Image (cartoon, rainbow, N blue to C red):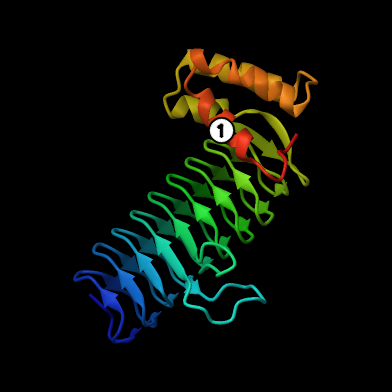
Amino acid sequence: MIDSRAVIDPAARIAPGVIVGPYSVIGPDVEIEAGCRIGPHVVIRGPTRIGRDNEIFQFASIGDAPQDKKYAHEPTRLEIGDRNVIREGCTINRGTVQDRGVTSIGDDNWIMAYVHIAHDCIVGNNTIFANNASLAGHVRIEDHVILGGFTLVHQFCAIGAHAFTGMGSAIAKDVPPYVMVSGAPAHPHGLNSEGLKRRGFSEEAMVTLKKAYKLLYRSRMSFEEALIEIRALEPECVEVTPLREFLERQTRGIIR
């Protein structure tokens, strides 16, 4: 299952049945679990752990050193979960000791061509990154986020669960859960209603989340005043809780 033209370091740990295409290079301190398919001309360096049933397409660079001038060859890590698709030309870097020391990608993500995920990023589950989306260092992406093509996310920003960014968005502040943004710089454009419907959110939850959105973006309240009113919506809608928690922990300010 490993092409004879691939270059595999003897210290790499590759589960039986993993497919590795021609001219791929896999270094030491790399662990690849069962069911993975590694295309041709892929470079994987470590320390990197790749879970089960991932597919990595040609010319991807996985687990190389972070693009950070402070990096001094410390043994930082990249951890990738299960069932991810990583398309052509993607670059995913390891972490730095100035942060957690690890870049993390969860499960069931669809990462399209030429996406860049920089050092110390945390990517959740079931996300979609369209072509050429780029995350700077220390970015946090929560579950079910969709990034439109050529979206750029500034370092230390967070994007909340079920958020959506339009193509070409330039994001320099946090994006709350459930919100659609677009533009350069990005601005809010309503609730991600279509995405929430597809994921089974009830009509009652949608109504309450729209109330929360209007409090945050259309009421002319201060951030602190809107947050108080959003807290009051939690007893009638548990889906408000992730929004409230996100708003309470944000540090960069939110897109408004």
Q: Quadrant of the C terminus?
A: top right
Q: Position of residue 83 (x, y in %)?
A: 34, 54
- Tell me: residue 204, above or below residue 64: above
For the residue carrying disc 1, how many other residues have a C-alpha within 10 Å: few (<14), some (14-19), or many (20+)? some
Q: Which amino acid does label 1 sit on?
A: Glu
Residue found at x 64% / y 60% = 136
User: Relative to residue 238, is residue 49 drawn left or right?
Assistant: left
The quadrant where residue 220 appears: top right
Determine whether 141 is above or below 203 in the image: below
User: Percent from the top left, x then y, of residue 93?
Assistant: 53, 69
Residue 134 placement, left or right of 173: left
Residue indicated by mark 1: 245
- Residue 214 in percent (x, y) is at 69, 19
Residue plotted at (61% across, 57% down): 135
Would residue 156 appear left or right of 141 to someone viewing this image? Answer: right
Q: Where, by quadrant of the figure, is residue 48 drawn?
A: bottom left
Left or right of 3 in this view: 72: right
Q: Residue at x 54, y 27 (%)?
A: 194
Q: In which quarter of the image is the N terminus?
A: bottom left
